[in-house]
Amino acid sequence: MKFDIARRLRLAALLAGLALVAGACGRHESSELDLSAGWVPGPDAPTSDSKLHTPPPPFSEGIFPCSECHEADMPVNTKRRELSMAHTDIVLKHDAEHRWCLDCHDAADRDSLHLASGEKVPFEESYRLCGQCHGDKYRDWRAGVHGRRSGNWDGEKSYLLCVNCHNAHSPHFAPIKPEPPPPKPERTP
Amino acid sequence: MNAPETTRRDLLCTLAGCAAAAVAGGCSDFTHTEFFRSHFKELSEDELTAIREKIEAECKTKYDKDVTVSNTPAREGVQFAYALDISRCVGCRRCVYACVAENNQSRDPVVQWIRVLEMDKEKGIDFEHANPYYDAETVPRPGHFYLPVACQHCADPACVKSCPVGATWKEPDGIVVIDYDWCIGCRCCMSACPYGARRFNWKDPSLPADQVNANMHILGNRPRPKGVVEKCTWCVQRVRDGRYPACVEVCPVGARKFGNLLDPSSEIRYVLDKKRVFVLKNELATHPRFYYFYGL
C-alpha cells in the first residue's frame, strides 16, 4: 500500500512536469506569428499593376521645356565633348568616364529621355531609365523599400522619383547637418 | 476594452467572498488578485468617452486649442511591424524631432522617444561604446554608422511582465501601450526593457501651446502628466487611421519602413522575405517586431 502511494506521487510529479513543459511550449508559440492569418486589403489598397503616384520632376527653374532653347532647326552636335556654351554648372559624377549627356537625353526629341534601346521615356518616368542599370534598386523602389514613401500603409501611397532625392548628374548623397543631440542626463549634486 | 461589464455589486460580492474564504482558512479558487488582474483595466464605452472629453476640455483650458482624443481600436487582421535599413541611416536625427512634434513630448525637460546611436564601423553593433550624444557639422561621419533605437514592440515584452499594476500591455495589433492614468511611476518597466526605450517624466512636461498636435489618441500622444512613463507607440493616432508613422514619412533617406505583417504585399513582408534582417538582443527572446536590415 505504501509503495503504491509512492508510485502515485511519482506519477503525479511526472504529470506536473509534463504540464509545465506543455505550458512553456504554449507560451513560446504565442510569440510566434501565424502569417497566414486572414488579412483583407482595403478597397483602395494598391495592386501590383496600379499606377505609381510620383511628384513632378524637380527641374531647375526655367530649364524645361528644353526645346525652348534647343529649337528644331538648331544643329545637333553628337560629338562627346566638354560643354562650354551652356549647362556649365552641371558636374557629371555619375560614371562620367563612360557616359555623357546624350546617353540619357534624346538628341532628336529634346524634351524627352531615352533608354539604351532607343525607346523614348518622358521625364516623369525617369525611373525606368535609372532602372536599366540599377535594377535591384528599381525593384526595391517599386516595392516601396528603396526610398521614402508617404501616405497610407494600407492604401494610397506617394512615391518620390529617383531624381527627387538623387541628383541625376551626381547621385551620391551629400552629407547633411544633423539635428542637435539630446542633453546629457544631469548629475544630481 | 470591451470586457464583460463588472458592476459595483459584483466587485463587493467578490471582496466579501474572498474575506469569507480567508476567515474560514479555506482556499478559494477565485481570489481578489485574479479578479483585479482580469478586470481593473477595463473601462466601459461611456467611461472612456467621459475620460476623452475630460482630456479634450483640459487641453482646451491649458493650450486654448481644440483637440480630438480618439480611442480607435486595433483592426482585425493587422499585426504591425517596423523595419529600419541601417545601411542607409545617416544619423541626421530628423526622425527624433518629427516624433517629438507628432507625439507632444515635453520640450523642457527634453523627452525624446527615439535615440540615435552612433557606432564605430570597426566595432560593429556594440552598445557599450555607442554614442547617442554625437554632434557634427555633417553626418554621416567617416568610419561610423547609425542605429536609431526606440520601442521594439516585442511580441513577448519584458516591460509588460514587469509592471506591477498592469498599466502597460500589448494591443491586439502588436502595439505596446501605456495607460498614463494607471501608471504609478515605479519605473520597473524601464529597468526591465533591454532596449532603454522608455522615458520617465521627472518634471511637469512643458509643451508650447502653438506646437500641440491636436490629433491625439488616448493610448498615444495625449499630454502626459508628471510621474508617468512614456514611449514610442508607432504613432498609434496615425497608424490606426491607416497612415504611416511620422518618423517613416520624415526620414530623408527612406530608411524606415512600416506595415502589416499579415499583408503579403506589404513593404514589411518584402523586407522580411528578401533582405538580411536581424533584431536587437535576439538572445533575450523578447521577439521584437522592430527589424533592422541591410538594404544594400
Image: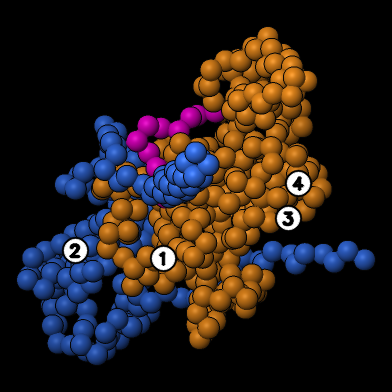
Single out the mark in the foreground, 4 or 3: 4
- Callout 2, which amino acid? Arg
Q: Which residues are magenta?
A: B71-81
Q: Which residue is at 63% across, 76% downward?
A: B128
Q: Earlier in the sequence, mark 1 or mark 3?
A: 3
Q: Chain of mark 4?
A: B
Q: Earlier in the sequence, mark 1 or mark 4?
A: 4
- Contact, CB < 8 Å: mark 1 with mark 4? no
In the foreground, A30 or A18: A18
Residue beneath label 3, please?
A: B110
Label 1, label 3: how far apart the Cα atoms are: 30 Å
Label 2, label 3: how far apart the Cα atoms are: 45 Å
Q: Earlier in the sequence, mark 4 or mark 3?
A: 3
Percent across and percent down for residue A38 are 28, 36
**Which chain is represented by blue in the image?**
A
Label 4, label 3: how far apart the Cα atoms are: 20 Å
The tint of chain B in the picture is: orange
